[in-house]
Amino acid sequence: MKYNRFVIAAIITAIAVPFTFAAKGERKKKTDTVAFATADKDGNSWLSKTEYAAAVKGTLDKEAADAKFSDLDKDKDGKLTEQEYNAASGGKKGRKKKGTT
């Protein structure tokens, strides 16, 4: 009897865990979209350097915001698309762990 409970609990966990992680990813996308829409004050679907600086004010000073904007603006058109903007929060891909070479 105890074995059956264990098997049932294991099956439920195996089914539930992927849905939990998928939902977390969806929430992240929605959060990024809301952050972009909030920063896009004129609603033209891209951020100017001024809009980006205002969005990160308090986190980055003007000089750091300008540098980050230039780094994020992959096509160097002076505008940040939502995709370019979200790349900043896109995770730790490509980063090295502390203490590794």
Image (cartoon, grey):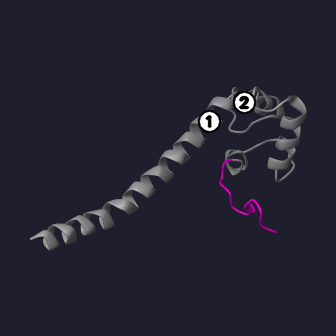
Indicate whether 60 appears above or below 90: above
Residue 86 in the image: state x and y as whole percent: 67, 47
Q: Which residue is farthest right? A: 63
In the rendered view, does 7 fall on the left or right side of 50? left
Span colored in magenta: 89-101
User: Is there CB contact under 8 Å for labels 1 and 2?
Assistant: yes
Indicate whether 52 appears above or below 9: above
Residue 68 in the image: state x and y as whole percent: 83, 43
Give the residue number, with chain letter if any, for mark 2.
55
Residue 87 in the image: state x and y as whole percent: 70, 51
* Magenta region includes residue 68: no
Where is the C terminus found, in terms of image quarters? bottom right
SS class, disc 1:
helix
SS class, disc 2:
helix
In the rendered view, does 52 fall on the left or right side of 64? left
**Residue at figure coordinates x 39%, y 62% from the top left:** 18
Give the amino acid at mark 1: Ala
Residue 47 in the image: state x and y as whole percent: 75, 36
Q: Which residue is farthest left? A: 1
Give the dominant element type of the magenta stretch: helix, strand or loop.
loop
**Residue at figure coordinates x 63%, y 30% from the top left:** 38
Indicate whether 100 appears above or below 32: below
Q: Nearer the viewer, residue 35 or 77?
A: 35
Q: Nearer the viewer, residue 5 or 44?
A: 5
- Tag shown at residue 35: 1
Residue 31, quarter of the rendered image? top right
